[in-house]
Image (cartoon, helix red, strand yellow):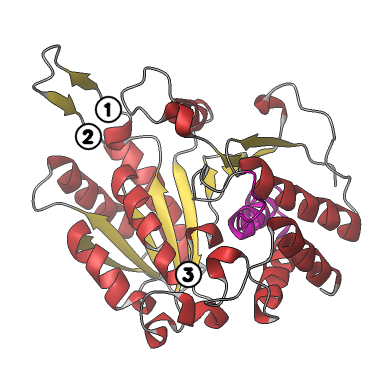
């Protein structure tokens, strides 16, 4: 199979973690008989089958009121390609359970798929700062169609998992959340085999830490999903562990770790590339339909962690972690031991 993957390394640690993921993808191409990734920078993102993105942001854009910010480009990318559903899987690896800041027994069996609406809500609504600086406003707007399509993604995903959807909103206060809840309930009628429950965002934020293993698929609007998935990183032990996929109605998608550019450690070679490598696995699964290849990467990551390999952010207290390159090499070596059917 020949596929074109546009690689956007981004800022800060982006090039470091993306380089590790690209190396793993090249190994997959060689082992499974696919054509390798092109070396030259591709002309446009539109010409590709998917985008692998590192991270954006940095100290030069530290002023939140700056007219031009890297996040604007990211939002435009999602909007341009109609990428309305952000899939963020959160798994708690047993070998890292003692590293998480909550009790290990609470993490047993944690496997949550967050689905965050990505092109609506307060991030895309009208906003204004008054000239006198004394007031400002942002607008959270959702249409039935926007909620329906992301809810469909959630229920279809749940059918392949434990058949349980938790819809997160703030329907006791927000009008947009009341529309969200009504619409999700209408979509649920098309999936009688899937159980639906509603949760208020503030209550859910607590319950996710208190009883995380009771959740299966969680669907939320844009800002709530953004905040909750960063919070969920404590379940995995580190923000560097979590991947994501931004998808639309077609197979094209943007794949990236959920962490930022981490300028404080950029260039030190110690960033955790796991989230980016697992994002590459999601790319293979969702945009290219290569399930066996995706599973091979996920299996290699799991066995590498079980063998004791750690980057600094997930290393044992008092012990140095592996550098990004060495850690990625361990995963590549583990990948070589995964059977190819």
Earlier-in-chain disc, 1 versus 3 = 1
Q: Position of residue 178 (x, y in %)?
A: 15, 47
Q: Are marks 1 and 2 in contact (CB under 8 Å)?
A: yes
Nearer the N terminus, badge 3 or badge 2? Answer: 2
Residue 71 screen position, x and y as percent: 44, 31
Measured in 3D between alpha carbons, the distance from the residue under mark 3 to the one under mark 2, in whole angstroms, is 32 Å
Neighbor class of circle 1 (other Cα within 10 Å; few <14, some 14-19, many 20+) is: some
Q: Is 26 included in the stretch rendered in magenta?
A: no
Q: Quadrant of residue 275?
A: bottom right
Separation of residues labelled 1 and 3 (CA atoms): 34 Å
For disc 2, the marked residue is 140
Disc 2 on helix, strand or loop? loop
Q: Against 267, is 291 above or below? A: below
Residue under pointer 1: 125
Q: Nearer the viewer, residue 38 or 191?
A: 38
Rendered view: 151 above or below 133 = below
Q: Label 3, on which residue?
A: 237
Q: Where in the figure is residue 310, as x and y percent of width and height?
A: 64, 70
Q: Which residues are magenta?
A: 267-292
């Amino acid at each position: 199979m020949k596929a074109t993957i546009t690689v956007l390394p981004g800022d800060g640690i982006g090039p470091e973690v993306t380089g590790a993921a690209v190396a793993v993808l090249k190994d997959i191409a060689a082992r499974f008989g696919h054509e390798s990734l092109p070396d030259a920078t591709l002309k446009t993102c539109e010409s590709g089958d998917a985008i692998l993105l590192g991270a954006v942001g940095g100290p030069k854009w530290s002023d939140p009121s700056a007219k031009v910010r890297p996040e604007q480009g990211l939002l435009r990318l999602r909007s341009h390609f109609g990428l309305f559903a952000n899939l963020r899987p959160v798994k708690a690896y047993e070998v890292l359970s003692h590293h998480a800041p909550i009790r290990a027994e609470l993490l047993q069996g944690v496997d949550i798929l967050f689905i965050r609406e990505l092109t609506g809500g307060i991030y895309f609504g009208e906003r204004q700062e008054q000239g006198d600086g004394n007031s400002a406003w942002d607008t959270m707007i959702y249409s039935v169609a926007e909620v329906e399509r992301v809810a469909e993604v959630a229920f279809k995903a749940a059918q392949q998992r434990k058949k349980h959807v938790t819809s997160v909103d703030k329907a006791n206060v927000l009008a947009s959340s009341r529309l969200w809840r009504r619409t999700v309930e209408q979509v649920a009628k098309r999936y009688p085999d899937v159980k639906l429950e509603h949760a208020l965002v503030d209550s859910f934020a607590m319950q996710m830490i208190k009883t995380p293993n009771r959740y299966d698929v969680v669907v939320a609007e844009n800002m709530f999903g953004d905040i909750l998935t960063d919070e969920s990183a404590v379940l995995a032990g580190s923000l560097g562990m979590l991947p994501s996929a931004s998808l639309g109605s077609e197979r094209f998608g943007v794949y990236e770790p959920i962490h930022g550019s981490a300028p404080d450690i950029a260039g030190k070679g110690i960033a955790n590339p796991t989230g980016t490598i697992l994002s590459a696995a999601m790319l293979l699964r969702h945009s290219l339909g290569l399930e066996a290849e995706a599973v091979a990467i996920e299996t290699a990551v799991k066995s590498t962690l079980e063998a004791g390999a750690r980057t600094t952010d997930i290393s044992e207290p008092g012990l140095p972690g592996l550098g990004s390159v060495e850690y990625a090499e361990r995963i590549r070596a583990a990948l070589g031991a995964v059977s190819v059917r």
